[in-house]
Image (cartoon, rainbow, N blue to C red):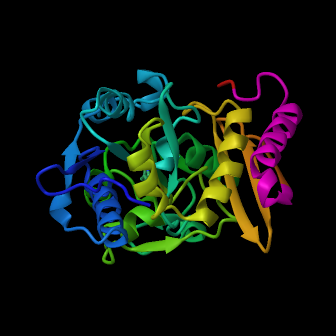
Amino acid sequence: MTIDLPTPDNALKIGTRGSPLALAQANETRDRLARAWDLPYEAFTIVVIKTTGDKIIDRPLKEVGGKGLFTKEIEEALLSGEIDLAVHSTKDMPVEQPCGLLLNTYLPREDVRDAFISPGGLTLADLPDGAVVGTSSLRRRAQLSNRRPDLKIVEFRGNLQTRLKKLEDGVAEATFLAMAGLNRLNLEDVPRTAIDVNDMLPAVGQGAIGIERRGDDARVGDMLAAIHDEETGHRLAAERAFLAALDGSCETPIAGLATLTGGSVALRGEVLRPDGSERIDDTEEAPLEDAGAMGEALGKRLLDRAGEGFFDWR
Ligand SMILES: NCc1[nH]cc(CCC(=O)O)c1CC(=O)O
């Protein structure tokens, strides 16, 4: 295969948000591409793009509304040719991409678990009755309310550093973060305990870096093929088809995690009422090639069992 590789004079442009986590993910992508194709770092430039979600930091995202708050400007830059590929946290990605764009390259997945973060070194089970916990995630809020209706949950937005500062300031006694984010930022000092996935099922796509590109850009497609992780790809095919069937937006508490055993993919999915008063979960398994169809079937089954109005606030 001969492909026209980028050079320092004609560098490949990698688009990303500007948060420390987003930059770490863009750097990992650049490192893997440089190694896979034996290119110098200078053959890539990292282009930081500010998204609507980054600009609005004082309101819960569900009030701002809509999907793609963290992706719109980045996808516009891809379509206009301002960047050649975009690096995302898959968990933040809508299930469908705009016409002309493809999201099907995934790097090897990090730890998928949520972390319980408490400066006092507490675990979830130790939290005293009525304790205040901060989170901006509807899924975590619903899962926590389901297990511990006694806790008081407060809104906690901002990037990882902002949230850690809020804990230091005593705004809440504990919060949750993805293990993947802590690991990618080498935040060994942050007091955390990893939560078993059976106690708190992660978000679809959690821990996976996804790379988006123009569908007609064969050169970038070839370059990305060298760093794609097949196993993560199969897991994400199941999880994202599950999410799509449930019409998951940031307004619905949904969790889902696929694992591979031998030649098959197993998926566990969960939906909750926003107030945590009810939780429905189920599992399904299929051969690898049926990952998408299986995910969709499980999503439809949960939707059926949930019935109309399940996700409404009350
Ligand atoms: N919604 C923000 C977000 N998107 C991805 C991650 C963590 C990294 C990942 O899951 O890949 C986080 C922060 C968090 O949930 O703690």
Determine if residue 276 is in view.
Answer: no
* Viewer-proximal residue among 300 and 103: 103
Total numbered labels: 0
Left or right position of 151 against 198: left
Relative to residue 74, is residue 20 depicted above or below? below
Where residue 78 sits, quadrant-wise, is top left
Q: Position of residue 308 (x, y in %)?
A: 81, 22
Q: Position of residue 202 (x, y in %)?
A: 61, 56
Position of the N terminus, as image quadrant, is bottom left
Relative to residue 79, is residue 124 depicted above or below? below
Where residue 272 sits, quadrant-wise, is top right
What residue appears at the point 29 percent right and 72 percent down from the top-left corner? 38
Q: Position of residue 210 (x, y in %)?
A: 47, 51
Position of the C terminus, as image quadrant, is top right
What residue appears at the point 25 percent right and 31 percent down from the top-left corner? 55
Left or right position of 16 against 236: left
Q: Residue furthest left?
A: 9
Determine if residue 249 is in view.
Answer: yes
Q: Main secondary structure of the magenta part?
A: helix
Within the magenta stretch, is there residue 202? Answer: no
* Viewer-proximal residue among 87 and 283: 87
- Residue bounds of the magenta highlight: 284-311
Left or right position of 20 against 197: left
Q: Position of residue 160 (x, y in %)?
A: 32, 55
Left or right position of 79 against 310: left
* Viewer-proximal residue among 210 and 193: 210
What residue appears at the point 36 percent right and 55 percent down from the top-left corner? 3
